[in-house]
Image (cartoon, helix red, strand yellow):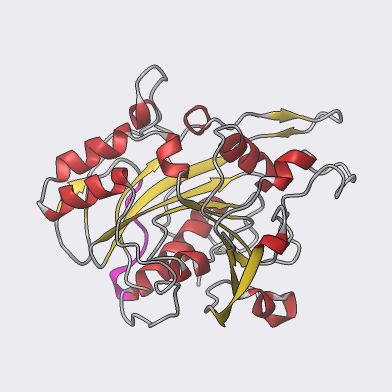
Amino acid sequence: MKYKNAQRTTHGIVHAGFSGFRAFVARKKGRCKLIVNRFVIPHDTIPSTVGRSLYRDIYRTKSISKMENNDNQPKWLQRAKDHIKFGQLEHFTMDMLHIGVKDILSESCFYLSAGADITPIVAFKDVIFSYILCDEHLYNAIEGIESKFNGILVKLKDRLIQQGFCEIQKFNLDKHFIGIKDRHWSNGYVSKLKNCEISFWNRENMIYSIMYINHDNTYTYTDLYIKNNIVPKAICEILPDGGSLCSNIENQGGAPTLTVEEKKNVLPDYLLGHTYSIGDIEQYEKLPDKVDYYGDYGPEYGSSNAMQIYKRIK
Protein backbone atom coordinates (compact mmCIF):
# COMPACT_ATOMS: atom_id res chain seq x y z
CA MET A 1 0.00 0.00 0.00
CA LYS A 2 1.36 3.43 -0.88
CA TYR A 3 0.70 6.39 1.38
CA LYS A 4 0.10 9.11 -1.18
CA ASN A 5 -1.27 11.68 1.20
CA ALA A 6 1.60 11.68 3.68
CA GLN A 7 2.96 15.10 4.50
CA ARG A 8 6.53 16.27 4.46
CA THR A 9 8.52 16.89 7.60
CA THR A 10 8.18 20.51 8.66
CA HIS A 11 11.19 22.73 9.11
CA GLY A 12 9.59 25.65 10.94
CA ILE A 13 12.21 25.77 13.67
CA VAL A 14 12.76 29.14 15.31
CA HIS A 15 16.15 30.65 16.08
CA ALA A 16 18.22 29.51 19.05
CA GLY A 17 18.52 31.65 22.16
CA PHE A 18 15.49 30.45 24.09
CA SER A 19 15.55 27.81 26.81
CA GLY A 20 14.52 24.20 26.43
CA PHE A 21 12.39 23.08 23.52
CA ARG A 22 11.22 26.63 22.80
CA ALA A 23 14.30 27.11 20.69
CA PHE A 24 13.42 24.22 18.43
CA VAL A 25 9.66 23.90 18.24
CA ALA A 26 8.02 24.35 14.87
CA ARG A 27 5.21 26.88 14.64
CA LYS A 28 1.90 26.11 16.31
CA LYS A 29 -0.34 24.81 13.60
CA GLY A 30 -3.76 23.29 14.13
CA ARG A 31 -4.92 21.05 16.93
CA CYS A 32 -4.71 17.33 17.57
CA LYS A 33 -7.24 15.07 19.29
CA LEU A 34 -6.27 12.05 21.28
CA ILE A 35 -7.80 8.86 19.98
CA VAL A 36 -8.78 7.48 23.37
CA ASN A 37 -9.23 10.30 25.87
CA ARG A 38 -10.54 12.77 23.30
CA PHE A 39 -9.08 15.92 24.76
CA VAL A 40 -7.50 18.56 22.55
CA ILE A 41 -4.08 20.17 22.80
CA PRO A 42 -2.05 22.44 20.51
CA HIS A 43 0.01 20.58 17.92
CA ASP A 44 3.17 22.01 16.49
CA THR A 45 4.11 19.89 13.49
CA ILE A 46 2.36 17.86 10.82
CA PRO A 47 -0.88 16.12 11.80
CA SER A 48 -0.54 12.43 12.48
CA THR A 49 -0.97 10.26 9.39
CA VAL A 50 -1.90 7.26 11.51
CA GLY A 51 -5.50 6.26 11.03
CA ARG A 52 -7.94 5.48 13.82
CA SER A 53 -8.86 2.24 12.09
CA LEU A 54 -5.52 0.81 13.19
CA TYR A 55 -6.54 1.15 16.83
CA ARG A 56 -8.17 -2.24 16.97
CA ASP A 57 -6.70 -5.31 18.69
CA ILE A 58 -4.48 -4.70 21.68
CA TYR A 59 -2.26 -7.73 21.99
CA ARG A 60 -1.06 -8.98 25.33
CA THR A 61 2.69 -9.16 25.36
CA LYS A 62 5.40 -10.19 27.76
CA SER A 63 7.20 -7.45 29.62
CA ILE A 64 9.61 -7.14 32.50
CA SER A 65 7.11 -5.66 34.91
CA LYS A 66 7.97 -8.31 37.51
CA MET A 67 11.65 -7.37 37.52
CA GLU A 68 11.17 -4.15 39.44
CA ASN A 69 8.54 -2.80 41.74
CA ASN A 70 8.67 0.57 40.04
CA ASP A 71 5.48 2.52 39.58
CA ASN A 72 7.18 5.91 39.54
CA GLN A 73 7.92 7.73 36.32
CA PRO A 74 10.77 10.26 36.04
CA LYS A 75 9.80 13.57 37.63
CA TRP A 76 9.54 15.41 34.32
CA LEU A 77 7.14 12.80 32.93
CA GLN A 78 5.25 12.60 36.24
CA ARG A 79 4.47 16.31 35.89
CA ALA A 80 3.17 15.67 32.39
CA LYS A 81 1.06 12.82 33.70
CA ASP A 82 -0.45 15.08 36.36
CA HIS A 83 -1.28 17.78 33.83
CA ILE A 84 -3.18 15.27 31.69
CA LYS A 85 -4.90 13.75 34.71
CA PHE A 86 -6.32 17.13 35.73
CA GLY A 87 -6.98 18.34 32.19
CA GLN A 88 -4.29 21.04 32.28
CA LEU A 89 -3.38 20.67 28.64
CA GLU A 90 -1.66 24.02 28.19
CA HIS A 91 0.53 23.25 31.20
CA PHE A 92 1.45 19.89 29.65
CA THR A 93 2.58 21.59 26.44
CA MET A 94 4.58 24.26 28.24
CA ASP A 95 6.29 21.68 30.46
CA MET A 96 7.34 19.70 27.41
CA LEU A 97 8.75 22.88 25.88
CA HIS A 98 11.05 23.38 28.84
CA ILE A 99 12.55 19.96 29.44
CA GLY A 100 16.28 19.44 28.99
CA VAL A 101 18.10 16.77 27.06
CA LYS A 102 19.60 15.26 30.24
CA ASP A 103 16.10 14.65 31.58
CA ILE A 104 15.23 12.78 28.40
CA LEU A 105 18.40 10.67 28.49
CA SER A 106 18.31 9.79 32.16
CA GLU A 107 16.71 6.38 32.76
CA SER A 108 16.21 5.92 29.00
CA CYS A 109 16.47 2.97 26.62
CA PHE A 110 18.80 3.38 23.64
CA TYR A 111 17.91 1.28 20.58
CA LEU A 112 20.56 0.91 17.85
CA SER A 113 19.39 0.60 14.21
CA ALA A 114 15.81 0.61 15.38
CA GLY A 115 13.97 0.75 12.05
CA ALA A 116 10.23 0.78 12.79
CA ASP A 117 10.53 -1.77 15.59
CA ILE A 118 8.74 -1.19 18.91
CA THR A 119 10.01 -4.36 20.65
CA PRO A 120 11.88 -2.63 23.52
CA ILE A 121 9.04 -0.17 24.10
CA VAL A 122 6.60 -3.03 24.66
CA ALA A 123 9.07 -5.15 26.62
CA PHE A 124 10.20 -2.38 29.00
CA LYS A 125 6.98 -0.37 29.15
CA ASP A 126 6.48 -0.96 32.88
CA VAL A 127 9.95 0.18 33.97
CA ILE A 128 11.26 2.56 31.29
CA PHE A 129 9.37 5.60 30.00
CA SER A 130 11.90 7.39 27.80
CA TYR A 131 13.19 5.82 24.55
CA ILE A 132 15.92 6.95 22.16
CA LEU A 133 15.59 5.18 18.80
CA CYS A 134 18.46 5.63 16.36
CA ASP A 135 18.77 4.65 12.70
CA GLU A 136 20.83 6.20 9.93
CA HIS A 137 19.66 4.41 6.78
CA LEU A 138 15.94 3.77 7.44
CA TYR A 139 15.79 0.69 5.22
CA ASN A 140 12.30 -0.33 6.38
CA ALA A 141 10.48 2.88 5.55
CA ILE A 142 7.09 2.52 3.89
CA GLU A 143 7.35 2.84 0.12
CA GLY A 144 5.40 5.63 -1.49
CA ILE A 145 6.21 8.29 1.11
CA GLU A 146 8.65 10.85 -0.19
CA SER A 147 10.49 11.20 3.13
CA LYS A 148 11.97 7.92 4.41
CA PHE A 149 11.96 9.42 7.90
CA ASN A 150 8.20 9.95 7.74
CA GLY A 151 7.84 6.47 6.25
CA ILE A 152 9.54 4.96 9.29
CA LEU A 153 7.53 7.03 11.74
CA VAL A 154 4.20 6.11 10.17
CA LYS A 155 4.95 2.39 10.45
CA LEU A 156 6.33 2.69 13.98
CA LYS A 157 3.34 4.72 15.19
CA ASP A 158 0.89 2.29 13.60
CA ARG A 159 2.47 -0.47 15.68
CA LEU A 160 2.38 1.59 18.86
CA ILE A 161 -1.32 2.30 18.39
CA GLN A 162 -2.03 -1.40 17.93
CA GLN A 163 -0.43 -1.94 21.35
CA GLY A 164 -2.67 0.62 23.04
CA PHE A 165 -0.41 3.68 22.90
CA CYS A 166 -1.96 7.03 21.98
CA GLU A 167 0.09 9.96 20.70
CA ILE A 168 -0.37 13.22 22.60
CA GLN A 169 2.17 15.66 21.16
CA LYS A 170 5.25 15.77 18.94
CA PHE A 171 8.08 18.17 18.15
CA ASN A 172 10.82 18.36 15.54
CA LEU A 173 14.19 18.87 17.22
CA ASP A 174 17.28 20.71 16.09
CA LYS A 175 20.78 19.22 16.35
CA HIS A 176 21.87 22.08 18.60
CA PHE A 177 19.31 21.16 21.26
CA ILE A 178 20.28 17.50 21.49
CA GLY A 179 23.97 18.36 21.03
CA ILE A 180 24.83 16.26 17.98
CA LYS A 181 27.62 17.71 15.86
CA ASP A 182 28.64 17.12 12.26
CA ARG A 183 31.63 14.87 11.53
CA HIS A 184 33.91 15.65 8.58
CA TRP A 185 35.78 12.69 7.12
CA SER A 186 39.10 12.91 5.32
CA ASN A 187 37.47 11.84 2.05
CA GLY A 188 35.11 14.81 2.17
CA TYR A 189 32.06 12.94 3.50
CA VAL A 190 30.10 14.72 6.22
CA SER A 191 28.12 12.67 8.72
CA LYS A 192 25.35 14.81 10.20
CA LEU A 193 21.98 14.53 11.84
CA LYS A 194 19.30 14.31 9.16
CA ASN A 195 16.05 14.32 11.14
CA CYS A 196 14.92 14.14 14.74
CA GLU A 197 11.47 13.99 16.31
CA ILE A 198 10.32 13.56 19.88
CA SER A 199 6.78 12.41 20.57
CA PHE A 200 4.81 11.86 23.77
CA TRP A 201 2.42 8.97 24.27
CA ASN A 202 -0.20 7.87 26.74
CA ARG A 203 -0.92 4.25 27.64
CA GLU A 204 -2.98 3.15 30.64
CA ASN A 205 -2.42 6.51 32.38
CA MET A 206 1.36 6.39 31.92
CA ILE A 207 3.29 8.89 29.78
CA TYR A 208 6.12 7.85 27.45
CA SER A 209 8.70 9.87 25.55
CA ILE A 210 10.03 8.52 22.23
CA MET A 211 12.84 10.37 20.46
CA TYR A 212 13.74 9.14 16.97
CA ILE A 213 17.18 10.20 15.69
CA ASN A 214 18.10 9.74 12.02
CA HIS A 215 21.87 9.48 12.49
CA ASP A 216 24.80 7.09 13.04
CA ASN A 217 24.51 4.89 16.16
CA THR A 218 27.98 5.51 17.57
CA TYR A 219 28.04 9.24 16.90
CA THR A 220 24.62 9.54 18.51
CA TYR A 221 25.64 7.56 21.60
CA THR A 222 28.85 9.60 21.92
CA ASP A 223 27.20 13.00 21.63
CA LEU A 224 24.22 12.14 23.82
CA TYR A 225 25.30 9.73 26.52
CA ILE A 226 29.09 9.98 26.78
CA LYS A 227 29.18 13.75 26.48
CA ASN A 228 26.54 14.08 29.22
CA ASN A 229 28.15 11.37 31.40
CA ILE A 230 24.98 9.25 31.31
CA VAL A 231 24.61 5.49 30.86
CA PRO A 232 21.18 4.47 29.52
CA LYS A 233 19.04 2.25 31.70
CA ALA A 234 18.75 -0.23 28.82
CA ILE A 235 20.35 -0.87 25.44
CA CYS A 236 18.58 -2.74 22.67
CA GLU A 237 20.39 -4.26 19.69
CA ILE A 238 18.45 -6.81 17.67
CA LEU A 239 19.99 -6.77 14.19
CA PRO A 240 23.14 -8.93 14.05
CA ASP A 241 24.88 -6.28 11.93
CA GLY A 242 23.12 -3.29 13.39
CA GLY A 243 26.08 -0.96 13.84
CA SER A 244 27.24 -2.01 17.31
CA LEU A 245 29.11 0.25 19.72
CA CYS A 246 32.70 -0.92 19.24
CA SER A 247 36.00 0.25 20.69
CA ASN A 248 38.83 1.37 18.44
CA ILE A 249 40.59 -1.94 19.20
CA GLU A 250 37.60 -4.10 18.28
CA ASN A 251 36.98 -2.30 14.99
CA GLN A 252 39.83 -0.80 13.01
CA GLY A 253 38.04 -0.63 9.69
CA GLY A 254 37.38 3.10 9.71
CA ALA A 255 33.85 2.97 11.12
CA PRO A 256 32.97 5.27 14.05
CA THR A 257 34.24 3.81 17.35
CA LEU A 258 34.45 4.48 21.07
CA THR A 259 37.66 4.51 23.06
CA VAL A 260 38.46 1.40 25.09
CA GLU A 261 37.54 3.18 28.31
CA GLU A 262 34.27 4.49 26.86
CA LYS A 263 33.29 0.99 25.75
CA LYS A 264 34.05 -0.44 29.21
CA ASN A 265 31.57 2.00 30.71
CA VAL A 266 28.66 0.89 28.50
CA LEU A 267 26.97 -0.98 31.35
CA PRO A 268 23.20 -0.38 31.40
CA ASP A 269 20.89 -2.09 33.88
CA TYR A 270 19.25 -4.08 31.07
CA LEU A 271 20.18 -5.41 27.67
CA LEU A 272 17.75 -6.63 25.04
CA GLY A 273 19.07 -8.62 22.10
CA HIS A 274 22.70 -9.04 21.08
CA THR A 275 25.53 -8.32 23.51
CA TYR A 276 28.02 -6.73 21.11
CA SER A 277 27.69 -3.18 22.46
CA ILE A 278 28.09 -4.02 26.15
CA GLY A 279 31.32 -3.22 27.99
CA ASP A 280 31.45 -6.44 30.02
CA ILE A 281 28.89 -9.17 29.37
CA GLU A 282 30.21 -11.15 32.37
CA GLN A 283 28.36 -8.69 34.59
CA TYR A 284 24.97 -9.80 33.21
CA GLU A 285 22.62 -12.69 33.73
CA LYS A 286 20.14 -13.91 31.16
CA LEU A 287 16.51 -13.77 32.21
CA PRO A 288 14.41 -16.86 31.44
CA ASP A 289 11.54 -15.44 29.37
CA LYS A 290 11.84 -14.25 25.80
CA VAL A 291 10.00 -11.17 24.54
CA ASP A 292 7.82 -10.75 21.47
CA TYR A 293 9.31 -9.18 18.33
CA TYR A 294 7.58 -6.35 16.46
CA GLY A 295 10.14 -5.53 13.77
CA ASP A 296 10.54 -6.30 10.08
CA TYR A 297 13.31 -8.91 10.09
CA GLY A 298 12.45 -12.59 10.20
CA PRO A 299 14.39 -15.51 11.70
CA GLU A 300 16.73 -15.59 8.70
CA TYR A 301 18.24 -12.34 10.01
CA GLY A 302 18.79 -13.73 13.47
CA SER A 303 16.05 -11.69 15.09
CA SER A 304 14.46 -14.74 16.71
CA ASN A 305 17.72 -15.41 18.55
CA ALA A 306 17.88 -11.89 19.93
CA MET A 307 14.65 -11.82 21.93
CA GLN A 308 16.42 -12.28 25.24
CA ILE A 309 16.72 -9.80 28.11
CA TYR A 310 19.82 -9.62 30.26
CA LYS A 311 19.98 -7.92 33.66
CA ARG A 312 23.12 -6.51 35.19
CA ILE A 313 24.19 -8.25 38.39
CA LYS A 314 24.52 -5.60 41.08
Residue 154 image offset from top left, x and y in percent: 45, 61
Which picture quadrant has residue 112?
A: bottom right
The residue most toward the left is 86
Direction from residue 225 to residue 37 in the image, left or right: left
What residue is shown at x 39% (from left), y 31% (from top)?
12
Residue 305 lies, with reference to residue 138, above or below; the image says: below
Direction from residue 238 to residue 29 in the image, left or right: left
Magenta span: 46-53
Residue 48 on the magenta segment: yes
The residue most toward the front is 314
Residue 21 on the magenta segment: no
Is residue 216 visible from the viewing direction of this image? yes
Direction from residue 175 to residue 11 in the image, left or right: left
What residue is shown at x 45% (from left), y 36% (from top)?
102
> In which quadrant is the C terminus drawn?
bottom right
Residue 239 image offset from top left, x and y in percent: 69, 66
All told, the count of numbered labels is: 0
Which picture quadrant has residue 181?
A: top right
Residue 34 image offset from top left, x and y in percent: 22, 59
What residue is shown at x 37% (from left), y 74% (from top)?
162
Residue 29 lies, with reference to residue 132, above or below; the image says: above
What residue is shown at x 44% (from left), y 74% (from top)?
63
The residue most toward the top is 17
Given residues 140 and 167, the one toward you in this image is: 167
Given residues 254 and 222, the one toward you in this image is: 222
Residue 153 image offset from top left, x and y in percent: 47, 57
By secondary structure, the bulk of the magenta-drawn segment is best described as: loop
Given residues 57 and 281, the one toward you in this image is: 281
Is residue 147 visible from the viewing direction of this image? no
